[in-house]
Image: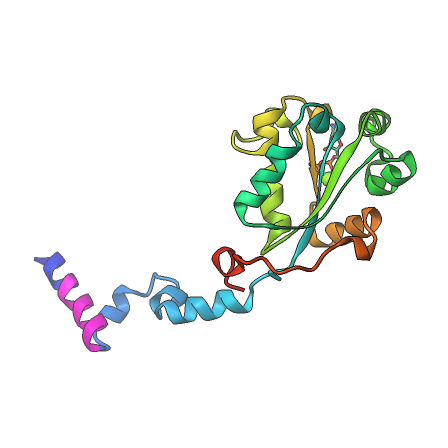
């Protein structure tokens, strides 16, 4: 009986705009939802991260040796992100020491330099909505033993010293790393023909 009353009141509220007692029943619902999808849209639209946000992703020497480059690129392509720069190189210690400048005092730093210079890396810049955060999720926990299955590290590695892939950890970090690894003219601004299918922005 009570249920029928609640249903009837809600029905009146939504269909006839009757500002009756249903207002009280809805007060626990966030206002953005309560006021209809229009306000949800307005709120998320205004706080959208830049659709052209960029990040640096690198397949580390173990990933290259194990022929994982194609699979890693494929994950970013399938996700709908846009590749705007790519190169393969044997990285110098000088570049690495700038790239990992925050880790210089860590005990694993010497072995990290040795690992990262042990063979070529494939370094890329990817672009898309919220890409820094999303790519960190796709890459997974730094220690593959703790990385979720389905992430790159969770699927392809088991030890922190051979974790296959790098991705920038913040938009500011991404900007710094992109400038470190790429000249401006090496990055292409191009239009994806499926842009409207991968992002509304
Ligand atoms: N690393 C390591 N041992 C550790 C922690 C990190 O060898 O205990 C290496 C690992 O290759 C990692 C890199 O150092 O990817 C950079 O560490 P960071 O904390 O920045 O992790 P990431 O951002 O790569 O997840
Ligand atoms: Mg890092």
Which secondary structure type mostly characterizes the magenta part of the structure? helix
Q: Is residue 152 left or right of residue 27?
A: right
- Residue at 19%, 77% (x, y): give it: 16
Q: Is residue 183 left or right of residue 7?
A: right
Q: Nearer the viewer, residue 192 or 118?
A: 192
Q: Nearer the viewer, residue 158 or 92?
A: 92
The total number of labels drawn is: 0
Residue 180 image position (x, y, % from top left): 84, 48
Is residue 136 placed above or below 36 in the rendered structure? above
Residue 141 seen by the camera: no
Q: Is residue 187 left or right of residue 152?
A: right
The quadrant of the picture occupied by the C terminus is bottom right
- Residue at 53%, 46% (x, y): give it: 79
Is residue 101 placed above or below 120 in the rendered structure? below
Residue 88 image position (x, y, % from top left): 78, 37
Q: Nearer the viewer, residue 192 or 6?
A: 192
Q: Is residue 68 left or right of residue 27?
A: right
Is residue 148 placed above or below 9 in the rendered structure? above
- Residue at 54%, 31% (x, y): give it: 148
Residue 124 image position (x, y, % from top left): 72, 44
- Residue at 24%, 77% (x, y): give it: 19
Q: Is residue 11 magenta?
A: yes
Report ligand 2 position as a quadrant. top right
Is residue 16 placed above or below 130 in the rendered structure? below
Q: Is residue 126 magenta?
A: no
The quadrant of the picture occupied by the N terminus is bottom left
Give the magenta part as a residue range.
Answer: 7-16
Residue 92 seen by the camera: yes
Q: Residue furthest front?
A: 193
Residue 22 image position (x, y, % from top left): 23, 69
Picture quadrant of residue 100:
top right
Picture quadrant of residue 114:
top right
């Amino acid at each position: 009986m009570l249920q029928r009353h609640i249903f009837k009141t809600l029905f009146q509220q939504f269909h006839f705009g009757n500002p009756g007692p249903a207002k009280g029943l809805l007060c626990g619902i966030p206002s953005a939802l309560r006021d209809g999808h229009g306000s949800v849209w307005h709120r998320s639209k205004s706080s959208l991260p830049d659709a052209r946000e960029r990040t640096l992703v690198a397949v580390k020497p173990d990933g290259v040796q194990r022929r994982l480059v194609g699979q890693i690129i494929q994950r970013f392509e399938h996700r709908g992100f846009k590749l705007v720069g790519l190169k393969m190189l044997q990285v110098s210690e000088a570049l690495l020491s700038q790239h990992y400048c925050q880790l210089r005092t860590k005990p694993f730093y010497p072995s990290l330099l040795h690992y990262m210079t042990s063979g070529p890396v494939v370094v890329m810049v990817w672009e898309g909505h919220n890409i820094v955060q999303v790519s960190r999720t796709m890459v997974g926990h730094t220690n593959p033993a703790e990385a979720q299955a389905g992430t790159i590290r969770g699927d392809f590695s088991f030890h922190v010293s051979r974790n296959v892939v790098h991705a920038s950890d913040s938009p500011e970090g991404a900007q710094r790393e992109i400038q470190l690894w790429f000249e401006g003219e090496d990055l292409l601004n191009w239009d994806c023909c499926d842009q409207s299918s991968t992002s509304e922005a």
